Amino acid sequence: MNKKITNLFFVISIIFIGLGIYRGEIDRVFIKATNICLECIGIG
């Protein structure tokens, strides 16, 4: 039972990652990640 739930969540996560790529949200994620990293370092 536990293995089935783990596999189900894995498949669902892959589907959502694919949907995000399809919608073109990769650029938005990278921009936000870069801004967060630069703020943590203190450069931005």
Image (spheres, rainbow, N blue to C red):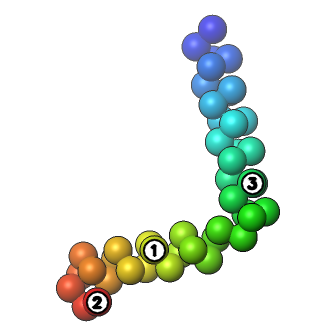
Which secondary structure, mark 2? Answer: loop
**Sequence-wise first label, 2 or 3:** 3
Which secondary structure, mark 3? Answer: helix
Residue type (three-letter) at the residue carrying disc 3: Leu
In the image, farthest residue toward the bottom: 43
Reading the image, the residue beneath label 2 is 44
Residue under the image location 21 percent in, 85 percent down: 42
Looking at the image, residue 30 lies above or below residue 38: above
Residue type (three-letter) at the residue carrying disc 2: Gly
Residue under the image location 69 percent in, 36 percent down: 12
Residue 2 percent across, percent down from the top left: 58, 13
Reading the image, the residue beneath label 1 is 32
**Mark 1 Cα within 10 Å, few/some/many (few <14, many 20+)?**
few
Residue 15 sits in quarter: top right
**Mark 3 Cα within 10 Å, few/some/many (few <14, many 20+)?**
few
Looking at the image, residue 29 lies above or below residue 20: below
Reading the image, the residue beneath label 3 is 19
In the image, farthest residue toward the front: 23
Q: Quadrant of the N terminus?
A: top right
Q: Is residue 24 left or right of residue 33?
A: right
Tell me how far mark 1 sits from mark 3, CA to CA: 18 Å
